[in-house]
């Protein structure tokens, strides 16, 4: 139906001879996997279960004519556990479609909407295909910009979860306003102080007014409201931003059906000048899981987004221990300093030296029990759950990261990067493995790039991880899961590239210090790729270790696998 | 829902006919590092070619590409008058960090914050880094995904082709 309208519309325009004013664009991505059994890392014929081939693909087409834009996205998945994406995605169809008219003053979108209010604390819809995550809002959105510097948005709809029927999901309604004082007040146009204020309100509606749990029926709020206010100040080299959000009681499977209000604060202070940037951030999250279906327990149907405040590690060893935000409660701080030692100084050398320092720490919040008729109701279903003083930090540390990086171009042909990382990672909380020993580890990373000539380069990456996990202990077979990636690791990567088109690499990760002898495995992989303009074709093969894939603090467990993968992306 | 959608689609198509976009850049408003709103469709370089590149703080090759472009930027500007617009697709976790990050690294580009990947989707970018070269009228003349050491040379060859 929609397609036919689309085609009809396009044909009509051919008739009018204005085809040259319109524009069609799009992109494709195809991933194909072939798996084999690998006794070494415990993958048997049974795990593969006849599913040797898996794959998925997306195709997107967009049409633009002046102020009008429309698009569709087709998705197809034939995946199983080893692919690492949620198998509920299996199937195919038109997953996303939208049409937008926006003339600068008024904008209307119908269909699937991606948007964010402020930092997204109470509303953010986005897609992240590497996680198989898409919570697009199917509905309608209106944007109104009455005067320069003022934006008002309203939206209404239901969120996507895989291929599930939208009827089962709660209704989400939201309004957001943002006011840029400098842009809207003429006298302040060139003021040194730059100020932006914003506020939003989001409400979700679910039809059921009761929930049965353990033989007791609890009354549920049909409508749950959340509101947030934010400001952004800039004064010369200084910047300050803060957002505070609050949500009324929203008992859910995620918070064990407690009736406590939720709240969240995110604040940043920064200083920067050419060559030096410093930012200090702090946040507090208390009972802020906000989903459009109260029975969901995983990263599904989230309405709000809790930004993690920690460094995103990209090197293969530290990234196995990525932090996942804890919506039930966390307090975190982060300090990041970037400094470039200028060129032509003693320490800077001919090309300058780039330094980066990062410290982040996340703790639990403090929870005090509430006594009801002399009964301790801490986290008890159907109660307020707990009291929590706003500025009190909980004793339990979830994550701490301290790292330092030196990035130096030594000569025309040589480039060196060194990094040290000190990590504390509470595996029990972050991965949900009961009784897991926290990871207290050091990492060293070194990378050397040698330019053979203008376009040919060799890159060698070496990493080591020292994990303090107890060795020589009797390991209870029930908790073997907790030791899968523990102990010391060594990793290397060797890559040869011919810019801008070719790359080939071989890499190994070796868990030589695992407390369980059977786990001391090599994970050897090779990849080869070709890039031509906007088309990229890559083949990689080998062993994939079990671990978490995390993007933006949202993580997904990926099982170990052995096989080859072909990825093709292109756009037009 | 579907009927409403189809109906509005017709309506929009009709309205859409009245306007036209000269450039290949979509009508999307993003913020710059000073918190000012910038309409992407109005981006230009006074009739000269310009580059738009998508990156993220967590993307290693992107940071390498930006460092490499920083080194050659002054020469390129002098020789061709090119301008580089650099679009960060970092989400809210890093919004406040971009300015200190960029300043600390000494990058001289015009930075835009695409916090919810709106422009990234509209420009059909799958993975960063992704670099576009626009001619003086804002038409895409070349694009490239990924960055390999020395890749900036290739971009410069393309810039030279259209700079007179």
Image (cartoon, coloured by chain):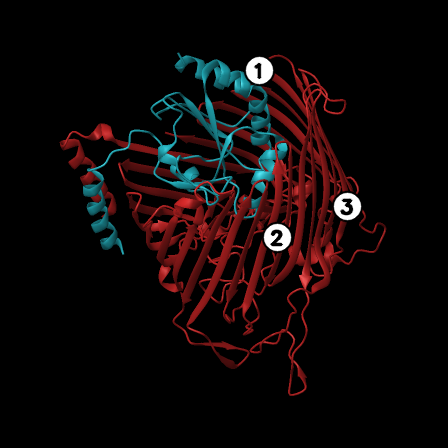
Chain colours: A red, B cyan
Q: Farthest residue to the front: give it.
A: A187
**Against B116, is A416 above or below?**
above
In this rendering, does residue B148 appear at all?
no
Q: Dots 1 and 2: beta carbons under 8 Å?
A: no
**Relative image position of residue A482 (x, y in whole percent):** 72, 54
Chain that bears disc 1: A
Q: In this image, B131 relative to A386: left or right?
A: left
Q: Residues within 10 Å of mark 3 (few under 14, many from 20)?
A: many
Mark nearer the N terminus (3 vs 1): 3
Q: Residues within 10 Å of mark 2 (few under 14, many from 20)?
A: many
Which quadrant of the structure image shows residue A438? bottom right
Q: CA distance from mark 2 to mark 3?
A: 18 Å
Q: Residue A441 got which mark?
A: 3
**Relative image position of residue A153 (x, y in whole percent):** 36, 54
Chain that bears disc 3: A
**Against B29, is A297 above or below?**
below
Residue denoted by label 1? A455
User: Residue at position x 54%, y 37% from top?
Assistant: B56
Residue denoted by label 2? A324
Q: Dots 3 and 1: beta carbons under 8 Å?
A: no
Secondary element under disc 2, as helix, strand or loop, is loop
Q: Are marks 2 and 3 on the same chain?
A: yes
Q: How many marks?
A: 3
**Relative image position of residue A13 (x, y in whole percent):** 17, 34
Mark nearer the N terminus (2 vs 3): 2
Secondary element under disc 1, as helix, strand or loop, is loop
Q: Dots 2 and 3: beta carbons under 8 Å?
A: no
In this rendering, does residue B53 appear at all?
yes
**Which one is in front, A372 or A291?**
A372
Q: CA distance from mark 3 to mark 1?
A: 37 Å
């Amino acid at each position: 139906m929609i397609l036919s309208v689309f085609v009809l519309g396009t044909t009509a325009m051919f008739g009018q001879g204005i085809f040259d004013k319109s524009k069609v664009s799009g992109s494709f991505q195809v991933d194909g996997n072939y798996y084999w059994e690998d006794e070494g890392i415990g993958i048997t014929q049974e795990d593969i279960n006849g599913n040797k081939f898996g794959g998925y693909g997306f195709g997107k087409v967009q049409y633009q004519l002046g102020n009008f834009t429309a698009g569709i996205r087709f998705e197809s998945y034939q995946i199983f556990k080893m692919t690492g994406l949620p198998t509920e995605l299996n199937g195919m169809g038109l997953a996303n479609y939208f049409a937008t008219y926006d003339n600068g003053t008024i904008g209307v979108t119908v269909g699937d909407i991606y948007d964010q209010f402020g930092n997204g604390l109470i509303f953010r819809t986005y897609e992240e295909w590497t996680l198989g995550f898409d919570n697009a809002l199917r509905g309608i959105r209106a944007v109104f910009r009455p005067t320069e510097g003022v934006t008002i948005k309203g939206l209404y709809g239901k969120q996507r979860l895989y291929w599930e029927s939208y009827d089962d999901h709660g209704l989400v309604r939201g309004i957001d306003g943002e006011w840029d004082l400098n842009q809207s007040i003429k006298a302040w146009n060139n003021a040194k102080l730059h100020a932006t204020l914003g506020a939003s309100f989001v409400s979700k509606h679910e039809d059921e007014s009761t929930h049965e749990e353990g033989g007791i029926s609890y009354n549920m709020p049909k409508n749950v409201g959340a509101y947030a206010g934010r400001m952004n100040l800039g004064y010369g080299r200084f910047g300050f931003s803060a957002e505070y959000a609050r949500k009324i009681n929203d008992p859910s499977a995620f918070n064990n059906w407690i009736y406590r209000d939720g709240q969240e604060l995110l604040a940043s202070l920064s200083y920067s000048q050419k060559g030096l940037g410093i930012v200090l951030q702090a946040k507090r999250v208390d009972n802020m899981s906000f989903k459009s279906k109260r029975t969901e327990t995983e990263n599904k149907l989230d309405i709000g987004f809790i930004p993690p405040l920690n460094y995103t590690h990209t090197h293969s060893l530290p990234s196995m221990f990525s932090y996942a935000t804890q919506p039930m409660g966390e307090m975190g701080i982060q300090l990041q300093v970037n400094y470039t030692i200028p060129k032509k100084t003693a320490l800077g050398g001919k090309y300058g030296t780039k330094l980066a320092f990062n410290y982040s720490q996340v703790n639990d919040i403090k929870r005090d029990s509430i006594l009801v008729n002399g009964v301790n109701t801490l986290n008890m279903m159907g109660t307020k759950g707990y009291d929590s003083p706003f500025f009190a930090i909980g004793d339990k540390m979830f994550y701490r990261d301290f790292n330092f990086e030196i990035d130096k171009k030594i000569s025309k042909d040589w480039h060196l990067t060194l990094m040290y990382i000190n990590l504390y990672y509470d595996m029990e909380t972050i991965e949900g493995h009961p009784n897991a020993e926290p990871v207290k580890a050091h990492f060293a990373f070194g990378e050397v790039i040698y330019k053979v000539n203008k376009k040919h380069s060799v890159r060698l990456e070496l990493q080591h991880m020292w994990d303090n996990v107890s060795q020589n202990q009797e390991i209870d077979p029930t908790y073997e899961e907790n030791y899968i990636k523990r102990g010391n690791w060594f990793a290397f990567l060797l890559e040869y590239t011919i810019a801008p088109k070719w790359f080939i690499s071989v890499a190994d990760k070796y868990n030589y210090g695992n407390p369980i002898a059977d786990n001391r495995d090599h994970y050897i992989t090779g990849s080869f790729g070709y890039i031509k303009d906007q088309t990229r074709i890559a083949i990689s093969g080998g062993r994939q270790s079990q671990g978490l894939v995390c993007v933006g603090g949202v993580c997904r467990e990926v099982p170990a696998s052995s096989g080859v993968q072909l990825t093709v992306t292109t756009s037009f | 829902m579907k009927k409403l959608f189809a109906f509005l689609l017709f309506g929009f198509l009709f309205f859409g006919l009245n306007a036209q976009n000269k450039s290949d850049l979509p009508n999307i408003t993003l913020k710059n590092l000073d918190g000012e709103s910038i309409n992407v469709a109005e981006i230009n370089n006074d009739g000269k070619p310009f580059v738009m590149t998508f990156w993220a703080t967590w993307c290693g090759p992107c940071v390498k590409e930006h460092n490499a472009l920083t080194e050659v930027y002054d020469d390129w500007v002098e020789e061709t008058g090119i301008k580089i617009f650099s679009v960060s697709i970092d989400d809210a976790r890093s919004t406040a960090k971009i300015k200190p990050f960029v300043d600390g690294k000494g990058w001289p580009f015009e930075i835009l914050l695409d916090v919810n990947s709106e422009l990234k989707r509209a420009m059909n970018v799958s993975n960063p880094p992704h670099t576009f070269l626009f001619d003086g009228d804002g038409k895409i003349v070349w694009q490239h995904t990924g960055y390999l050491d020395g890749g900036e040379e290739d971009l410069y060859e393309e810039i030279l082709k259209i700079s007179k």
